[in-house]
Image (spheres, rainbow, N blue to C red):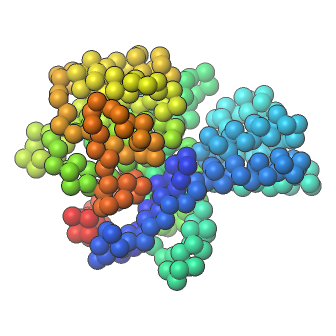
Amino acid sequence: MRLLAIDIGTGTQDILLWQSGVEAENLIQMVMPSPTVLVERRVRAATSAGRDIVLTGVTMGGGPCAWAIMDHLRAGYRVFATPEAARTLDDDLERVTADGVQLVADADEAPAGALRVELRDLDLDAIGRALQAFEIAPEYDGLLVAAFDHGAAPPGYSDRAFRFDYLTQTIGRTGRLAELSYLRDDLPPSLTRLAAIASCTPPDMPLVLMDTGAAAALGALDDPQVRRARYPLLVNVGNFHTLAFQLVPDGGQNGDLTVRGLFEHHTGELKPGQLDGLLDRLALGSLTNEEVFETQGHGALMRSRTPVQPDLCAVTGPRRALMSASQYRPYFAVPHGDMMLAGTFGLLRAAALRKPQWCEEIEGSLG
């Protein structure tokens, strides 16, 4: 069995071709530029060439590509976009058009000289070509994809609040990291970015979708040192978002861990020492949702207010160096020897739960 796992971030997309019977260290893996970075490059090239652009495709992650599009408008060039592509900038299309983007039903409605830029988070053809360059057949029994999805907030409702409402109603209810994973037909309708990713896959292909932060945390548990901890803090310091979980034993006989508390913040908004302070209050059980939200984060959730002393702080993510001087003396987790693939290993663990018929082979491979 072969599963293609892709963790889509802001800076990179981390790709693992898992195959049953192959040791984790020998699996095919690639760390490539993220889709939003690739679109950013195309838009900035159009700006340099002085050309209008027309955005086609589907809703994708913003960040670098959205900044480039807005810079293109500020430079005096026109931006046309289909509605689905325009939602990359904002789910509220009135706000998108107020910024100067002109909506078109399809690319043919744009002026003939406009450069077409396709938006999508998942390009299976490009991944397939990269694999074929090394004589690896792009054939898979299933796809596993992780991405960050704010969700489509109603007009006038904070994206940050809407995102944390979603976390509260899912992982906050059950305490399971894998709660933020879905089969194709189970995806909540508000998760429009993950739905757009699903639309870029063959409809008959088995598909598991997941939130990036939860995938990284679940993957970190594949590091033997992290797995031995009883009360770990799991912190994923991403380029845009920092998501921290405190885990405790769930009380069952199998020794599983459950989420006691969590918070999510914007990495770029965190001041020196602020992250340690948030982790302190997470462990003490005194962290409040208001404290995180009012400092431009998403929020916090405590499933228990009983203080718990962490016995390990495991850190993943491309900006993990921000915690180098932390009082928590962080352990930089390396599941199966590779931090960058933490999210893909988390995807595999979630897939083993969502697709029981895959469980035996995945666990036989990963341990």
Q: Quadrant of residue 229?
A: top left
Q: Residue furthest bottom?
A: 135
Q: Give how far across and how far down residue 56 sits, in percent.
A: 74, 52
Residue shown at 72%/55% (left/top)?
118
Residue shown at 82%/34% (left/top)?
74
Q: Give how far across and how far down residue 318 sits, in percent.
A: 46, 46
Q: Quadrant of residue 64?
A: top right
Q: Quadrant of residue 91?
A: top right
Q: Quadrant of the C terminus?
A: bottom left
Q: Is residue 188 left or right of residue 60?
A: left
Q: Quadrant of the N terminus?
A: bottom left
Camera sees residue 195: no
Camera sees residue 326: yes
Q: Give how far across and how far down residue 344 sits, in percent.
A: 40, 57
Residue shown at 58%/53% (left/top)?
34
Q: Give how far across and how far down residue 46 sits, in percent.
A: 82, 51
Foreground of the two, 218 or 319: 319
Foreground of the two, 76 or 328: 328
Residue shown at 41%/16% (left/top)?
290
Image height of 281 relative to 317, above or below: above
